[in-house]
Image (tube, grey):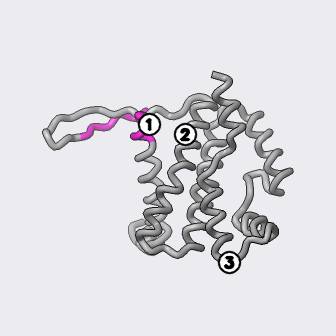
Amino acid sequence: MLIMLLKKGKRMTKFLRYVFISTLLFSLLGCTLNVPHSTTTPSSKTSTVYLKVPSNDCEIRKWYNYQVVAISLINKRWIEEGIALEERAKMAYALRHNARMNARYMMQDKKAVKVLQERDMKKYGNPDGPDFSYLIHKSKSKGIKGDEVYKKIIESSSRTNAQYNADCMNTK
């Protein structure tokens, strides 16, 4: 197993970054884990932390928004690390797409998930939202060229739909 992980190298590093960021965001939100585990502080005190999994669609939307909003911050780190623009665009797209898919998986209202999938099928030709090549084509069809295409993908990866956010806020 360890050999398989070592062979994956760069991909595994990206995955671990994503896991770390997700965990960081959950802790910033004050979320807790369902499975208790002990943590030791420098003063040797032990405490138990519980992460609460989002339990309704509005909590899931909030979780999704925090995932997406973090992409611009993560991109700043990637820039510091010297990661090429195209690679950053692909990784930003992947983070956004994974957040979308995970949010839909967590949604309790499967009819609402179906509505979102139908909307995406109509809008993007894919029930899971736009793929990377769709985003490139969309930018180029608007006359955007060169590096600006990738910059646009990174920008759009860190934006959410204001109407869906407002709908959720109005149902509380």
Q: Amino acid at mark 3?
A: Gly
Residue 42: image x %, image y %?
16, 43
Which is nearer the N-term, disc 3 or disc 1?
A: 1
In this rendering, would 71 be left or right of 112?
A: left
Residue pointed to by mark 2: 63
Q: Report the quarter where the C terminus lies.
A: top right
Residue 19: image x %, image y %?
45, 53
Q: Amino acid at mark 2?
A: Trp
> Is 109 drawn above or below residue 136 in the view shown?
above
Q: Are marks 1 and 2 in contact (CB under 8 Å)?
A: yes
Density class for disc 1 (Cα within 10 Å; few <14, some 14-19, many ≥20) is few
> Is 167 drawn above or below residue 140 in the view shown?
above
Spatial distance from mark 3 to mark 1, Cα to Cα? 37 Å
Q: Amino acid at mark 1?
A: Leu
Start and end of the magenta stretch? 26-39
Residue pointed to by mark 3: 146
Secondary structure, mark 1, is: loop
Instruction: Let me know if residue 33 is in the magenta part.
Output: yes
> Is 7 drawn above or below residue 155 in the view shown?
below
Q: Report the quarter where the N terminus lies.
A: bottom left
Residue 115: image x %, image y %?
80, 39
Residue drawn at (70%, 37%), measured in percent from left and top? 164
> Is 106 drawn above or below residue 130 in the view shown?
above
